Image (spheres, grey):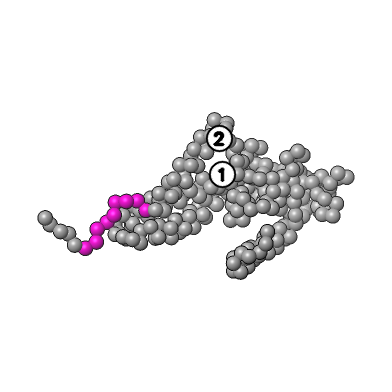
Amino acid sequence: MEVRHGTSRSDSPELSLIILVGLLCLVATYWLLVAVGLAPVEFFEHDSLRDDHLASTMVSLGFRGVPASIALTALLLYGTLIGFALEWLVLRHLSLGIWRAPLGLVILWAVLAIAAPLSMATCQALKHRCHQSRNTSTRALLGETVIVQEAPDESGLCRATLEDDSDFIVTLHGKRRDCCMPSERRVLVKYLADEDTYRSVPQQEYLDAHTRLRKMGLLRKHHGGHTAH
C-alpha cells in the first residue's frame, strides 16, 4: 500500500459556508411565507428605534430606508457568493486540520465585512422602489433623514420629504417642546401607526445620541457589564 506524505486538501466545506448557507435557507423560507401572504415584508421592524432589535441594528450599520429583511437577504446572498468563491479558489486546496473550525469563524466575519458595502449599494438602489409601496416603506423609513417643508399646524402636524427622494412625502407629528422648523433636517425615530405619522428629532441631536450610546456600550463591555437593569 502506497502512503502519500505531505499535505492533502479537505473535501469538507468551511464552517463559515455551512452557516451562511443555513441562514440563507432560513431567509428563503421567510420570503416564501411573504409570497403566500403569511408574513409581512416589514417583519423585523418595530415602531421605534429606541430599543435594541434587528431593525435598529441594521439602521446603525448603515442599512436605512429598506426593510431589514431585504438588507439581511442582500448581506447573506453576497456573503454566500463570496464564501463559495473563497472556498473554490483557495480553501479547498488547503489542509487546515484542527484550525479549520476556528478559522471558519474568522472567515465568516471577513466575508460579511466584504459583503456589507455591496449590500448597502444594492439597498440604496432598491430604496426608490420600496418607497413606491406603502407595504415596505412605513417602519422601514425609521433612521432616514427628512427635510421639513412647512411650519407645523395647530395640531403639531407638518409635511417633510426624504432627503434623498424629494418626491416622497411623510407627515411629522411634533411635540410642543420640539417644534419643527421649515428646511430643518430631522431623523425619523418613531412611527405612529394609528395616525400614519412619524416622530422625529433634529439630525445633529440624533447623531450625538447615537455616538453617545455607542460609547456607553463600549464602557459597559469594558467594565464587565455589571450595570443594573
**In the image: residue 186, left or right of residue 62:** right
Mark closer to the chain start, 1 or 2:
2
Q: Secondary structure at mark 2?
A: helix
Q: Residue at x 60, y 53 (%)?
A: 57
Contact flag, marks 1 and 2 (Cβ < 8 Å)? yes
Which secondary structure dominates the residues rendered in magenta? loop
* Residue that label 2 marks: 34
Q: Residue at x 61, y 64 (%)?
A: 225
Q: Which mark is residue 212?
A: none
- Residue 14, given in percent of the width and then of the height, sits at 37, 53
Label 1 to label 2: alpha-carbon separation? 11 Å
The image shows residue 113, relative to residue 165, as above or below, that is below
Q: Residue at x 60, y 44 (%)?
A: 44
- Residue 221, given in percent of the width and then of the height, sits at 59, 65
Q: Nearer the viewer, residue 196 or 148?
A: 196
Camera sees residue 114: no
Q: Which residues are magenta?
A: 6-14
Q: Quadrant of the N terminus?
A: bottom left
Question: Amino acid under label 1?
Answer: Ser
Q: Secondary structure at mark 1?
A: helix
> Is 97 contained in the magenta span?
no
- Residue 188, given in percent of the width and then of the height, sits at 71, 50
Q: Name the residue at the bottom extreme.
A: 223
The image shows residue 31, relative to residue 121, as above or below, that is above
Q: Quadrant of the C terminus?
A: bottom right
- Residue 214, given in percent of the width and then of the height, sits at 64, 63
Q: Residues within 10 Å of mark 2 (few under 14, many from 20)?
A: some
Q: Residues within 10 Å of mark 1 (few under 14, many from 20)?
A: many
Q: Which mark is residue 69?
A: 1
